[in-house]
Amino acid sequence: MADAALDRRSWSADASSAQAGRIPVRFLRDAIAARLAERKTGSYDYLLILRFALVNLVGFALLGLAHVYGLVAAALESDKTGICLLIAAVFLVGLGACAGQVWRTSQELNRARRCEPVEGSELRRYLDKVSGHEVGSRAIFATNLRLRLAHRIAYVRGIAGGLVLLGLIGTVIGFIIALSGVDPAGVSDVKSVAPMVSTLIAGMSTALYTTLVGSVLNIWLTINHGLLMGGTIKLAATVIELGEAHGDA
């Protein structure tokens, strides 16, 4: 009884959308049937967000564990250049941008799975483009959609790559600091050896810790980008599939 009532309500709402948005009723009928079947299977609407939250919960838990063992404090104290803090700040910017894109992609994916072509959504724009076009033209629109969605999240991967570059810059600066304290003329003087060793250790610490921080945070952000890319691919596939059904209707 509940499914029948839901079916009638969906028919009424989508029929109104069909009259306003030039979407064929047969297309909406098939989409409603698929929507009801999907609800019966118990699929998760916000699975992408849940995965993103789980990955970063594990990441921050490991970061807290590193802090307990003193690794975070050691990295910050050993890096006199502040590059580790810069890498951390860039990582947080990238993680925040990735979170925003995950939320946006999840919302778009939920609408596409429910066949809700609301105004301004990717599904609505794509359906309007492919309406009345032949298969060849729809293939071009599909390729453009994939490229546009990939371009929308490409900067997150760019930020992740920038973390490694900052780590390498820190490595070079650390070696420069280490070698700057070495004076070949003073090697024979016992009093000059201690300052040289101290500068050498400080430079090597900077080089190693900046490399470590940049590499670890790069891996963390790259994993998040992989989740975002997977959701984007699912969004493109779902929108294109509905567009093909719309074009054939």
Image (cartoon, grey):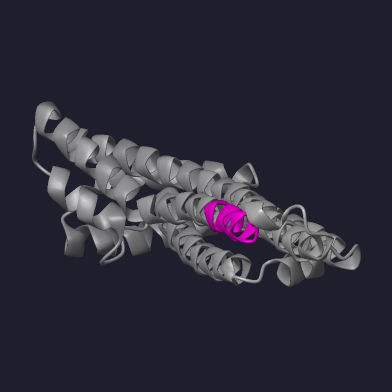
Which of the image's four quarters has the N terminus? bottom right
Q: Is residue 40 visible?
A: yes
As displayed, is residue 133 above or below residue 94? above
The front one of 40 and 112 is 112
The front one of 128 and 214 is 214
Which of the image's four quarters has the C terminus? top left
- In the image, taking residue 17 as reference, residue 190 lies left or right, namely right
- In the image, taking residue 17 as reference, residue 184 lies left or right, namely right
Residue name at image x 26 percent, y 66 percent? 120
Percent position (x, y) of residue 223? 59, 46
Stretch of the chain drawn in magenta? 170-183
Percent position (x, y) of residue 77? 75, 71
Percent position (x, y) of residue 100? 47, 66
Q: Is residue 114 visible?
A: no
Magenta stretch contains residue 182? yes
Percent position (x, y) of residue 53? 66, 60
Of helix, strand and loop, which mostly describes the magenta segment?
helix
Residue name at image x 45 percent, y 56 percent? 159
Magenta stretch contains residue 1? no
Residue name at image x 31 percent, y 64 percent? 118
